[in-house]
Amino acid sequence: MGEHRGERPRMPPAWRVAAPLIAAAVAGASGLLLRRLEVVGPSMQPTLVPGDRLLAVRLPAAWPLGPGDLVVLHDPRLPRGDAPPVVKRVVGVGAGRRGVVVEGDNPAASTDSRTYGPVDRRQVVGRVLYRYGPAGRTGWLLGRAGVRTV
């Protein structure tokens, strides 16, 4: 309905983001562009719960971050090679490479910028885009929920 012969169907906005990611995965480049993660702790509840499986896009250092983004970073308290990836929400971004303030959605169970201060932008290695499991909890994670002024 609403389409005329010879017109290309319009791609829904979500697919404009998903199509390149899916193409990269199919082409075998997913190890370079995408990262799969599984949530293991309660620090991001209720948004993310243990067992949630996530897809994150790897970010170059120049990629802009904004309050509300769910990001993957290395625990800044540990040497980078030993630091497991953690998922936190950006609540503030300063100028330059320093000053990314991240927090878990569950303050009582989260070790985050309230403990270790702002993190260097280079510690942020990905942005969470999609929850692909478990069934019934799948969907895009692109919103700005939990944003507050810092």
Image (cartoon, helix red, strand yellow):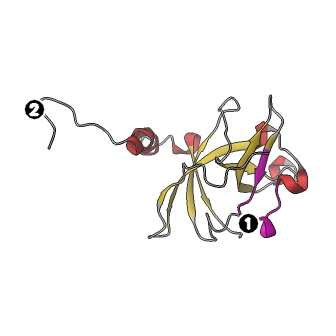
Give neighbour class at mark 2: few <14, some 14-19, many 20+ (Cα, 10 Å).
few
Residue 67 sits in quarter: top right
Give neighbour class at mark 1: few <14, some 14-19, many 20+ (Cα, 10 Å).
some
Q: Is residue 92 left or right of residue 8?
A: right
The answer to which of 32 and 86 lies nearer the viewer is 86
- Name the kind of residue labelled 2 in the image: Arg
Query: What kind of element bears circle 2?
Result: loop
Image coordinates for residue 135, horizontal then vertical, percent:
45, 70
Residue in view at x 15 percent, y 37 percent: 3
- Name the kind of residue labelled 1 in the image: Asn
For disc 1, the marked residue is 106
Decide: is 19 above or below 111.
above
Query: What kind of element bears circle 1?
Result: loop
Residue 96 sits in quarter: top right
| Magenta extent | 101-112
- Label ID, residue 15: none
For disc 2, the marked residue is 5
